[in-house]
Amino acid sequence: MFVSNVCPRSEQNYVISFVVPNQKKLTELAKQRGIVGTWEEICTHPDMEREVLKEIKEVAVNIKLQRFEIPVMVHLSPEPWTPETGLVTDAFKLKRKELKNHYLHHIERMYGGK
């Protein structure tokens, strides 16, 4: 599985997700696809976003999520979410407000600037 952590958002009429990918597995996939670069470049590569989104959709269908619950777009975060980054609590629960503020630019991009 390519996903280490995920935070779905639904502010418009479709769901988007922010994902911290599993570095080892995503790097292996990138190498298989001939994609080279830094970890950040791998995470921002459109093919890698598509692959992770494909995996998320497959899992969502297998667990019988409704269509409106399945993400349409994904952003891969090269940095892990830790208490030190302020994006999760000490118990590693998501801090949704902080995540929203941290990824505001990406949220606007994925919702078409709305």
Image (tube, rainbow, N blue to C red):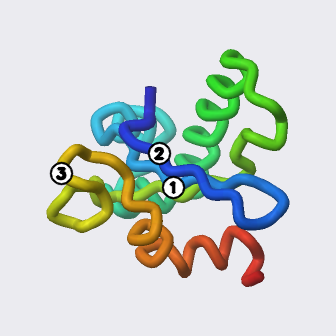
Residue of label 2: 6
Badge number at residue 18: 1
Q: Nearer the viewer, mark 3 or mark 2?
A: 3
Q: Which secondary structure, mark 1?
A: strand
- How many angstroms separate mark 3 from mark 2 (CA)? 17 Å
On the picture, is 10 further left or further right than 68? left
Residue of label 3: 90
Quarter placement of the N terminus: top left
The reply to whether callout 1 and callout 2 are in contact (CB within 8 Å) is yes
Earlier residue among tags 1 and 3: 1
Q: 34 above or below 97?
A: above
* Residue at 33 percent of width and 47 percent of height: 93
- Tell me where residue 57 sits by quadrant: top right
- What percent of the width, then of the height, locates residue 23? 30, 41
Q: 104 above or below 75?
A: below
The crowding category of the residue bearing disc 1, from other C-alpha atoms within 10 Å (few below 14, some 14 to 19, many at least 20), is many
The crowding category of the residue bearing disc 3, from other C-alpha atoms within 10 Å (few below 14, some 14 to 19, many at least 20), is few
On the picture, is 62 further left or further right than 56? right
- What percent of the width, then of the height, locates residue 7? 50, 50
Earlier residue among tags 1 and 2: 2
* Residue at 38 percent of width and 60 percent of height: 95
Q: 35 above or below 83?
A: above
- Tell me where residue 42 sits by quadrant: bottom left
